[in-house]
Image (tube, helix red, strand yellow):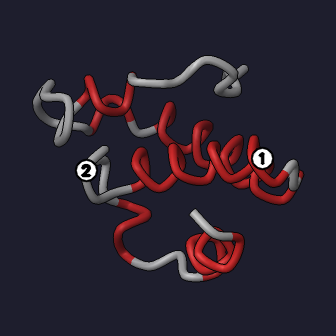
Amino acid sequence: MGGAAADWLVAGRGPEWTEPSLYSGRPGILLALHQAHAHFDDSAYGEVVQQGADALSEDLESIPGSSLYFGLTGVAFKPSGWPSSG
């Protein structure tokens, strides 16, 4: 992902940011931004990832299903180095 694409993801917080889907929602966006943070070493991406991870942990009770792409398993998926809440 290029820096411009990562900037677009951060600036364009549309309705997909409230979707709990790894495939097309906040968890997938945060995964991409986590990779951008690691690649570009830009703390702004890391801050957005931490805020998003905190928001996801607050929403866990309201997420239906447990599938990887559209449920709790996708929210729970995190690569090594992902920030922990708390």
**Quarter of the C terminus within the rendering:** top right
**Quarter of the N terminus within the rendering:** bottom right
Residue at image location 58% in from the left, 38% down from the top: 53
The answer to which of 57 and 70 lies nearer the viewer is 70
Q: CA distance from mark 1 to mark 2?
A: 20 Å
* Type of amino acid under label 1: Gly
* Type of amino acid under label 2: Tyr
Horizontal and vertical percent for residue 28?
40, 49
Kindly identify which numbered label has been placed on residue 23.
2
Horizontal and vertical percent for residue 17?
43, 64
Residue at image location 56% in from the left, 72% down from the top: 9
Count the marks. Answer: 2
| Left or right: 82 as drawn, with respect to 64 | right
Kindly identify which numbered label has been placed on residue 46.
1
- In the depicted structure, whether residue 45 falls above or below residue 64: below
Q: Which of the marked residues, 1 or 2, is nearer the chain's N terminus? A: 2
Residue at image location 34% in from the left, 57% down from the top: 25
Q: Place residue 61 in its image quadrant.
A: top left
Residue at image location 87% in from the left, 48% down from the top: 41
Horizontal and vertical percent for residue 62?
27, 38
Q: Do residues under tags 1 and 2 come within 8 Å of each other at their CB atoms?
A: no
| Left or right: 10 as drawn, with respect to 72 | right
Tag 1's secondary structure? helix
| Left or right: 7 as drawn, with respect to 32 | right
Kindly identify which numbered label has been placed on residue 63.
none
